[in-house]
Amino acid sequence: MHGPRQKVLRKALKVVAALALACVLAVGLLLTTLWFEHNSPLELPRPTGPFAVGRIGTTWVDPARLDPFAKPPRKRELVVWIWYPAQRSCRDRPAEYLPGSWQRALAKHSGGLFQLLFRNSTKVRCHSLEEAGVARSSRPFPVVLFRSGVGALAFQYTTLVEDLASHGFVVVGADTPYSTSVVVMPDGRVIHKTLAGNPGDAPISEEKRVRLAQSLIGIWTADTRFMLDQVARLNERDPSGRFTGKIDLHSVGLAGHSFGGATVAQFCHDDSRCRVGIDIDGRLFGSAVPEGIEQPFLFLLSDHGEEWSSPHCEICADIRSAARPNPADKLIVTMIGAHHFSFGDQSLTQSRILRAALVALGGEGGLDPRTGLASACRYVHEFFEIHLRGAPREALYSAPLVAGVRFEKK
């Protein structure tokens, strides 16, 4: 009686063992593939403009404000990166995509197997030149302030800002302590995000998240105002001499992704120095929503599918509300198949295996990353060309610039 049962049990154990071995081999193969992809070289898309691109980093301290998140209290600090049209020389040094101290801090912050889901930053090649001279020009260059998403590093938008700089714009971005996932200060301090500074992915109620975001938008808007004040000081008297007299402060544009885009909308609502703004897939907060934005403004959005036309979409209603005034100069452009990170380098540095899995599960759009970045760069560049340099507006406002977008004029 026991013989047949023992045979069935042995057979079942063999099947279980075979399945376990297959799972181990599959996991091993997946990890090996991820490791090789993680450590393979990646070159970012080449800038499309005629100028070489320079990059410098610095730290700006606002003497007029205490950082509301710092303990013990200290003045508000921003780590600032400037991309600009550069003059090539024999002393040119290629810039690292991410400086060494930032690479180490970010690796420690991410930790473990999570790192394998993204390209090793040491293997990513950008196209900037470290501390190159500013390109010669008979006229000063327009300036664009770029605000990253609340947890993202400014470097993660290198493709977009390098392309702008290659077309003759000075682009100023910043990493914000306690909001950016990790910030490395010049004195070696490593500052991580906090709940108050970065409520985006915290396990809290939506009501509390919105309340914190409404408070944070005021702080980020003040940061942006300080950044533009500092740019004016650089133009008046740059200690290095690099930017003195090279920046056109009558041609100021702003662009931002996610919460950075919401900050741009609020800043342009508050400050008349903003000539033109771009919100890249950012949910709006603050008084810009009910009161609207007077300046020319582009909303460049990911694909929200049928939600965009739903009467119950509060985020969509907020964007349309902010776009009501000055209707001829408002555009809402949706990139079909794009997801929230299609506008930054993360769409390229993310593992292709992870991306394919997200597309298969329906959690991400299927837009090719390089196509998405090229389309975003084109719209951002053209919008600023029209409203900061006076380029002809008919082509941009009469029809979509690229295929695969939904185009809505306001």
Image: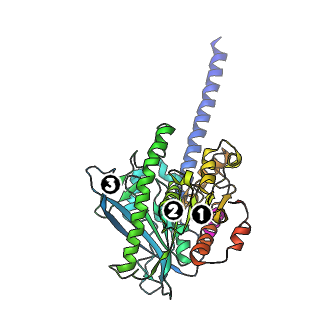
The image position of residue 288, as x and y in percent, is: 53, 54
The residue carrying pointer 1 sits among few (fewer than 14), some (14 to 19) or many (20 or more) residues within 10 Å by Cα, namely: many
What residue did someone put label 2 on? Answer: 268
Q: Main structural element of the magenta stretch: helix, strand or loop? A: helix
Instruction: Examine the structure image and report whether residue 25 is included in the region drawn in magenta.
Output: no
Residue name at image x 33 percent, y 51 percent? 68
Residue name at image x 61 percent, y 39 percent? 22
Q: Is residue 398 left or right of residue 296?
A: right
The colour scheme applied to this rendered structure is: rainbow
Marks 2 and 1 in Cβ contact (< 8 Å): yes
Q: Inspect the image, locate mark 1, and give the three-letter code of the amino acid beneath it.
A: Phe
The mark found on residue 297 in the picture is 1
Q: Pick the quarter of the image with the N terminus.
A: top right
Judged from this view, the residue extending furthest toward the top is 1
Question: Does residue 13 sit above or below 364 in this rendering?
Answer: above
Residue 53 shows in the view: no
Which marked residue is nearer to the observer: mark 1 or mark 3?
Answer: 1
Which marked residue is nearer to the observer: mark 2 or mark 3?
Answer: 2
What residue did someone put label 3 on? Answer: 67
Question: Does residue 161 sit above or below 313 in this rendering?
Answer: below
* Of 329 and 366, the residue lying toward us: 329
Mark nearer the N terminus (2 vs 3): 3
Q: Inspect the image, locate mark 3, and give the three-letter code of the amino acid beneath it.
A: Asp
Indicate the secondary structure of the residue bearing disc 1. strand
The image position of residue 197, as x and y in percent, is: 40, 49
Magenta region = 371-378
